Image (cartoon, rainbow, N blue to C red):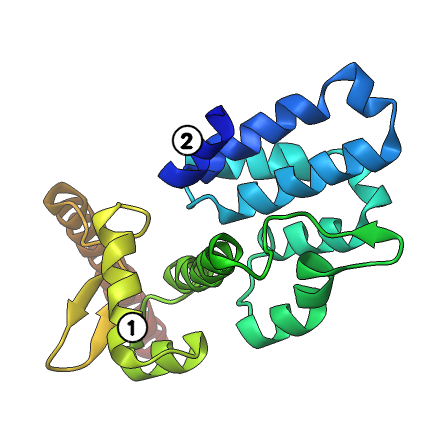
Amino acid sequence: SDDSVDLHEGSYLSICKHYRAIYDTPCILEDSSKWQQALKSVVLYVVLSPYDNEQSDLVHRISADKKLEEIPKYKDFLKQFTTMELMRWSSLVEDYGKELREGSPDSPATDVFTYNEEGEKRWQDLKNRVVEHNIRIMAKYYTRITMKRMAGLLDLSIDESEEFLSNLVVNKTIYAKVDRLAGIINFQRPKDPNDLLNDWSHKLNSLMSLVNKTTHLIAKEEMIHNLQ
């Protein structure tokens, strides 16, 4: 089937769209147990998809679906990935692991994270997505960070952290420059030389006007002083 082709290529976004098409089918929408299972798969596969504009757009469209309220644990799980905060893998496993992998009496699990080779691979990919999410958050909020601090926040070794970081840089998901000697990552893009020049001339103009004001004030002070 087409499904297995997609699964083997690991194209999570196209699998997500496949389940979205199933979810949108009238005969599925008539049966709450069927659409709930389809929507759960939609949520899990969009989260498993590496971040890019299309994935981000889809996450926000799926998040806006009112029907998510009927599968609250999945709604909360998806929200973790739209919140601009660092996530701890251990907490995520504690809060959602059982529900996503084994289900609960009123909410059966999907076969996305089954305890077989395929399921374990996807579970590892989920862990990778969490790491990537966290690095994107760091790149957004930090101008620079030490390798050691980043590895600590990611619960990874320095080598593992650096590997994730360089993949995101290669894919142009984030901008970062690593100073290995100092052990520091710089997330700030260097400015365009023209911007720097404009910035410099703007500062120079501000300085000149400050000097003029000061000179003017000193002259005024002296005048008042001489009048006394």
Q: What amino acid is at disc 2? A: Val
**Residue visible at 14% across and 73% down in the picture:** 179
Q: Is residue 64 left or right of residue 118?
A: right
Quarter of the image holding residue 80? bottom right
- Residue 168: give x, y in percent of width and height: 29, 53
| SS of the residue under disc 2 | helix
Q: What amino acid is at disc 1? A: Glu
- Observer able to see residue 54: no
Q: CA distance from mark 1 to mark 2?
A: 30 Å
Task: Point out the image quarter for the C terminus.
Answer: bottom left
156 vs 44: above or below? below
The tag on residue 79 is none
Q: Nearer the viewer, residue 94 or 110?
A: 110
The 10 Å Cα crowd at callout 1, few under 14, some 14 to 19, many 20 or more, is few
Q: Is residue 162 left or right of residue 25?
A: left
218 vs 24: above or below? below
The 10 Å Cα crowd at callout 2, few under 14, some 14 to 19, many 20 or more, is few
Quarter of the image holding residue 11? top left
202 vs 100: above or below? above
Q: Is residue 79 left or right of residue 52?
A: right
- Residue 20: give x, y in percent of width and height: 63, 27
- Observer able to see residue 39: yes
The tag on residue 160 is 1
- Residue 149: give x, y in percent of width and height: 36, 82
Q: Which residue is mark 2?
A: 5
Q: Nearer the viewer, residue 39 or 187?
A: 39
**Residue visible at 37% across and 78% down in the picture:** 156
172 vs 216: above or below? above
